[in-house]
Amino acid sequence: MTVYELDSDAPLDPVLVGPVLRSGPLADAVIEAVSDDNPDRDVYVVDRDDYVRVHTPHECRLTRRSLEEHLGGTFQLSALEIEMPSFKGRMRSRAQEYMWFHSE
């Protein structure tokens, strides 16, 4: 698994899915947590200054445990939606994980 920072003008592959977050410490922690939670997938990051796209191909998993580890404290995943104005793909939310997936 590798984290790639893509040029903000580059078109995104249609199979990439995941959250779009406001820039800041939470977005940085999500990038690290997504890297941990998707060890067999490359992570693609597009930094557009005020927001960040964090995507993986076909399926993107984010667990509460990994996010809390990178934030250094407790965090309710439902609070992520305040900092996530959008996402790519379809999303399934659970108390302990969020999953974005590609559907044709």
Image (cartoon, rainbow, N blue to C red):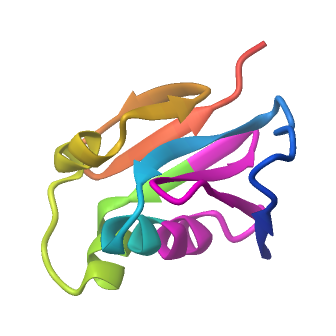
Name the image quarter holding residue 74: bottom left
Above or below, 30 against 2 in this view is above
Above or below, 35 against 46 in this view is below
Q: Quadrant of the C terminus?
A: top right
Residue furthest out toward the bottom: 72
Point 36% across, 69% down: residue: 24
- Which region is colored magenta? 31-60
Point 66% across, 50% down: residue: 55
Residue furthest out toward the top: 104
User: Considering depth in this image, is 95 or 5 the residue closer to the camera?
Assistant: 5
Point 59% across, 54% down: residue: 48
Percent position (x, y) of residue 11? 86, 38
Name the image quarter holding residue 67: bottom left
Query: In the visual, does 63 lie left or right of 103?
Result: left
Query: In the visual, does 91 lie left or right of 97?
Result: right
- The total of numbered circles placed on residues is 0
Percent position (x, y) of residue 79? 17, 48
Q: Is residue 77 magenta?
A: no
Q: Is residue 36 magenta?
A: yes
Point 32% across, 67% down: residue: 26
Query: In the visual, does 41 lie left or right of 95?
Result: right
Percent position (x, y) of residue 38? 64, 63
Percent position (x, y) of residue 77? 23, 51
Q: Quadrant of the N terminus?
A: bottom right
